[in-house]
Amino acid sequence: MIGASLRLKFVTSNEGKWLEVSRLLSSLGVECDRVNASLTEVQSDDLTEIARRAAVEAYGLFGGPLAVEDAGLFVEELGGFPGPYSSYVYRTIGVSGLLKLMTGVQKRRAYFLSAVGYADLHGSVRVFVGKVEGRISEEPKGSGGFGFDPVFVPENETKTFAEMSTDEKNLYSHRARAFRSLVESLQRGL
Ligand code: ITT
């Protein structure tokens, strides 16, 4: 595949994800076109299964090569909640609701997980996973990013994701890690 340029669609309704992924892919020399669409919200506890099924559905609608992503925030003291339900929990109780659930909780370890479903030109689907460990801050800080970014501080950092630029968040994030491993695999011709 040396010399062949990589190009794919990223199907997402989330503006924040698009901003992060388009900047990352462009820095890796991959061309990316956004498809702004919402796919069926599959019910599963397993993000990789959700991403796999979303990639199959998106391939049927838009053709490949394409990527979709399912992501979630897993808080250890809450048994991994909201996890696969992060989007719903964000829309309902939001950041302030999450902080209320964490009132008085000392152990604030949490992680973000990203599962990127990739469908190639022929509809063959693979899933790439990325994770970032960190903790839930006591109060929201910053105005960048999206979702739970104002309360997530990655390990060995003091700033929340919402206090970082997009490029800085891409140095750490679950999403950037998953997309980097997708691009590495494509660049190796796999
Ligand atoms: P799609 O169209 O791409 O599915 P979505 O917003 O519905 O967009 P998800 O189903 O993957 O995406 O929902 C993930 C939710 O988890 C998202 O709405 C946020 O609340 C939260 N989340 C995931 N990644 C995040 C990140 O990097 N920063 C902050 N919150 C994040």
Image (cartoon, rainbow, N blue to C red):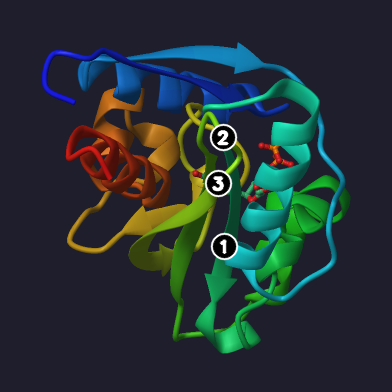
Q: Residues within 10 Å of mark 2 (few under 14, many from 20)?
A: few
Query: Is the C terminus in the top left, top right, bottom left or bottom right quadrant?
Result: top left
Q: Which of marks 2 and 1 is nearer the N terminus?
A: 1
Task: From this view, report whether residue 133 is shown above or below residue 178.
Answer: below
Residue type, numbered disc 3:
Ser
* Residue 38: assigned label: none
Q: Residue at 70% of width from left, 59% of height from top?
A: 50
Amino acid of disc 1: Leu
Residue under circle 1?
73
Residue 124's mark? 3
Q: Name the residue under label 2.
A: 122
Q: In this view, does 187 lie to the left or right of 54?
A: left
Q: Which residue is drawn at 71% across and 74% down?
A: 101
Separation of marks 2 and 1 at Cα, in angstroms: 32 Å
Mark 1: give few (<14), some (14-19) or many (20+) Cα within 10 Å.
Answer: many
Image coordinates for residue 169, horizontal then vertical, percent: 32, 37
Which residue type does callout 2 highlight? His
Q: Which of 106 and 23 is in front in this view?
A: 23
